[in-house]
Image (tube, rainbow, N blue to C red):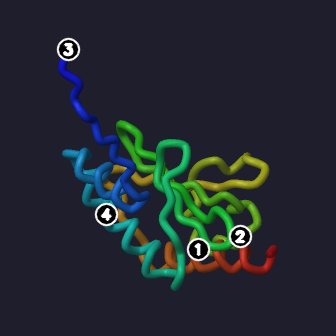
Amino acid sequence: MVKTAVKLLDPTASQRITDQIADLSDWRGPVLTRLRKLILDSVPGIAEEWKWGTAVWTFKGNVVAAGIFKDHIKLNFFKGASLKDPKKLFNAGLDAKASRAIDFHEVDSVDEPSLKDLVRAAAALNASDS
């Protein structure tokens, strides 16, 4: 019997997110790339993590997660119910006790300044809670 050495790779969270984007062969790949950049540019020190099989960005706690679905990308803000949303970006999970989400479909535009403001507010809320 011949034994073959198998090296198990444990990619970093950032690499897992990059791999997930690469596996998306339709509009979701470029949109997730854009959302990722917006999130990372919003808060100095925000970290990428891989939790529950999805991309999660953290700053003194969970800030936002990206769920990839067949027909949309969902950005779930963990403490979204506590955030002001003057531009009415939240369009999903509005009845949830703590979280709120934004569902992006292929034809949707991204309000970049307002999304950055939401990410900053979510990170600031985590910082004030710690």
Q: Residue at x 61, y 65 (%)?
A: 63
Nearest the eye: 1 or 54: 1
Residue 94 coordinates in the image, percent (x, y)? 68, 51
Q: Tag 2 or tag 1, which sits nearer the N-term?
A: 2
Query: What is the number of callouts on the image?
Result: 4
Q: CA distance from mark 4 to mark 3?
A: 46 Å
Q: CA distance from mark 2 to mark 4?
A: 24 Å
Q: Is residue 44 left or right of residue 126?
A: left
Q: Tag 1 or tag 3, which sits nearer the N-term?
A: 3
Q: Which residue corresponds to mark 2?
A: 83
Say the numbered circle drawn on residue 90.
none
Q: Which residue corresponds to mark 1?
A: 118
- Circles 3 and 1 in contact, beta carbons < 8 Å: no
Q: CA distance from mark 1 to mark 4?
A: 18 Å
Q: SS of the residue at dot 2?
A: loop
Q: Tag 4 or tag 2, which sits nearer the N-term?
A: 4
Q: Tag 3 or tag 4, which sits nearer the N-term?
A: 3
Q: Is residue 127 left or right of residue 41?
A: right
Q: SS of the residue at dot 3?
A: loop
Say the numbered circle drawn on residue 33.
4
Say what amino acid the circle numbered 1 marks: Leu
Q: Which residue corresponds to mark 3?
A: 1
- Circles 1 and 2 in contact, beta carbons < 8 Å: yes
